[in-house]
Image (spheres, rainbow, N blue to C red):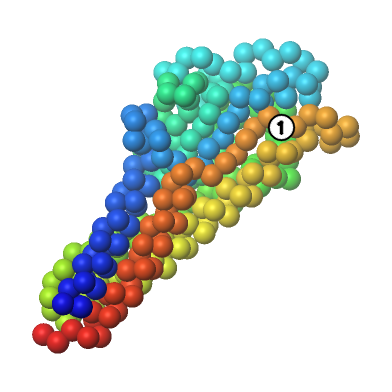
Amino acid sequence: MRGEYCIGGASLLSFVALLLLIFVHVGQINTSLVPHGISMAKINTSGFGQALSDAILDPDQGIYTTNYTSPLGQQNGLRQTYEFGLYSYCAYVNSSAGTCTNHTIADKFEPYIALTSDMLTNYSQYCHTMFANTTFINSSYLGYNSRVAYYFILIGTIFATMALFTGVLRKALPFVISTASSIIAAISILIGAAIWTSIVKKCEGINTLDLVPLNGDVVSGMIVSYGNGIYLTWAAFACLAAATVPYMVSCCTFRG
């Protein structure tokens, strides 16, 4: 009976982890209710227009757009918020109306490119100077690390699935496979979550960045923050790490 409890507990934890990871994967694939509510990183640009005007002493003229259907990346105007997922990012003119980019496997997290590609050239030129020497502008670093994190999360998702389905088979070999799969999944998800946490944390430096360093009166007006997808990924890691214990117990004590 103890073995049945172990397998039941491990299977439940693996199922919860897999469910959380599925939610992470669907984040920002479109603007419908569930995908819209899940992201790895968020950027609120609502204060940037005024900050830019104050910094360059020129009134804000058409930096934003209110047309949520206009394509992204074509200098059609900045949106109020940008939310990034594993396969695409979406931009919103308000809390619900927005549009998304095309889906790409291991989509790169390149927030500076995403934002400046929506601005007119004169505004993006100012940004290049203002955000120089920040991680936020280092698209090659952010893009590379986000792709690496994606593949670790993908590997973790695959092995979490293997752990769930092999763990219910009452045989010695499947118990060994489920234990190993759970360990590999937990380690992979840990690495993916840690990378995403790190790169978003570094981008948060622009939240307090002075656009005019000489007098320090103008803060960027952009707010970078963690998306709930990162928290879901950490929760999935916790579930998988916890599941390894009952899987190991079943693997070591099963007599079939």
Q: Is residue 102 visible?
A: no
Instruction: Tell me what residue is drawn at x 74 percent, y 19 percent.
Output: 53
Classify 213 as above or below 12. Answer: above
Q: Can you tell which quarter of the image residue 164 is in?
A: bottom left
Instruction: Tell me what residue is drawn at x 63 percent, y 45 percent.
Output: 203
Name, please, the residue furthest toward the right. Answer: 214
Classify 104 as above or below 146. Answer: above
Classify 27 as above or below 8. Answer: above
Quick one: 65 or 72, which is closer to the camera?
65
Percent coordinates x, y for residue 49 in the rendering = 67, 21
Q: Can you tell which quarter of the image residue 85 is in?
A: top left
Instruction: Tell me what residue is drawn at x 42 percent, y 23 percent.
Output: 96
Q: On the rendered image, what quadrant is the N terminus found in?
A: bottom left
Instruction: Tell me what residue is drawn at x 47 percent, y 63 percent.
Output: 191
Type of amino acid at the residue the image marks with label 1: Ser
Percent coordinates x, y for residue 132 in the rendering = 73, 41
Name, please, the residue furthest toward the front. Answer: 1
Q: Can you tell which quarter of the image residue 233 is in?
A: bottom left
Q: Is residue 124 left or right of residue 73?
A: right
Q: Tell me the element at label 1.
A: loop
Q: Is residue 37 visible?
A: yes
- The 10 Å Cα crowd at callout 1, few under 14, some 14 to 19, many 20 or more, is many
Q: Is residue 111 left or right of residue 38?
A: right
**Which residue matches tag 1?**
220
Percent coordinates x, y for residue 136 in the rendering = 64, 43
